[in-house]
Amino acid sequence: MANDNNPRGLIPLDWPYTKVHAYRITTGGDVFLGQGVDAVAAGYVSAVTITGIQTLIGVVVGFTGPNESGLATNAPFLDVSDLTPVVGGLPAGDRFAIVADDPDQLYVVQEDTGGTALTLAETWSSIDGIFRGTDADNTDGNTNTGWANLEIDASSVVQTTAATFQIVKLYETVNSDGTRNAVGDYAKWVIKILHHRMRGANIMVPVV
């Protein structure tokens, strides 16, 4: 009996009953569902790495295109080719990421495998994310499903605020074989963004 292995990035708890907003998104690579984004220059957001003291606005849950009318292709993720730079480095035709951006939003995420697995004693500790196989590659996702290959990195857990997320609790769910989600490889956890741009002093930090 084992936990299901199904990395899908950060999934808002209680989705779709959560607050979302559309943000203009700029170049930097393909963007996948379940991926974290933060503010960049000129009023845009971009996918970011998820290690250390990384400020986030929220997590991508959908996409839309110019005038919020739809993407250029019927893909489940935002292909970087849809964000062709023009003068000034901005996209040719705005694309939007639909972002779960409530600073109190909780997310479900899968733990990675290898090394020492997390235990219940790590609850309320801080932890970083990891993109499977590439560690800090913010373009790593499944182009068929559209989901990010983002997990939390058990080896990064710390008892300080020097990480991107905070562990809230083990997620209560059932695996495909009928067993309960349990601590160990591929365990599902509920986490929160530790350094949210719309909480406290982060809201006033200028973006350059």
Image (spheres, helix red, strand yellow):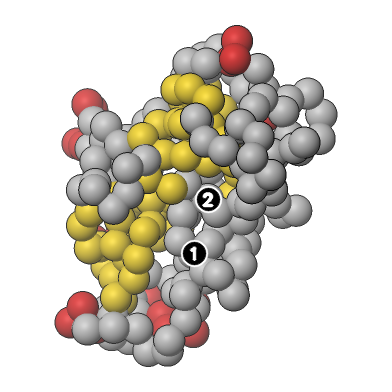
Quarter of the image for residue 168 reads: top left
Q: What element carries label 1?
A: loop
* Residue 133, horizontal then vertical, whole percent: 75, 53
Amino acid under label 2? Gly
Q: What element carries label 2?
A: loop
Amino acid under label 1? Phe
* Residue 96, horizontal then vertical, whole percent: 29, 70
Q: Earlier in the sequence, mark 1 or mark 2?
A: 2
Residue at 62% in and 61% down = 140
Q: Nearer the viewer, residue 45 or 62?
A: 62
Quarter of the image for residue 115 reads: top right
Whether residue 159 is visible: yes
Q: Name the residue under label 2.
A: 9
Q: Is residue 75 left or right of residue 70?
A: right
- Alpha carbons under labels 1 and 2: distance apart: 9 Å
Q: In this view, does 70 lie to the left or right of 147?
A: left
Q: In this view, does 3 lie to the left or right of 167?
A: right
* Residue 130, horizontal then vertical, whole percent: 63, 44
Q: Which of 196 and 59 is in front in this view?
A: 59
Residue 73 to residue 158: above or below: below
Label pair 1/2, CB-CB below 8 angstroms? yes
Residue at 52% in and 16% down = 123
Q: Residues within 10 Å of mark 1 (few under 14, many from 20)?
A: many
Whether residue 186 is visible: no
Residue at 59% in and 73% down = 143
Quarter of the image for residue 61 reads: bottom left
Residue at 47% in and 73% down = 77
Residue 169 to residue 173: above or below: above
Quadrant showing the N terminus: top right
Label annotation for residue 32: 1
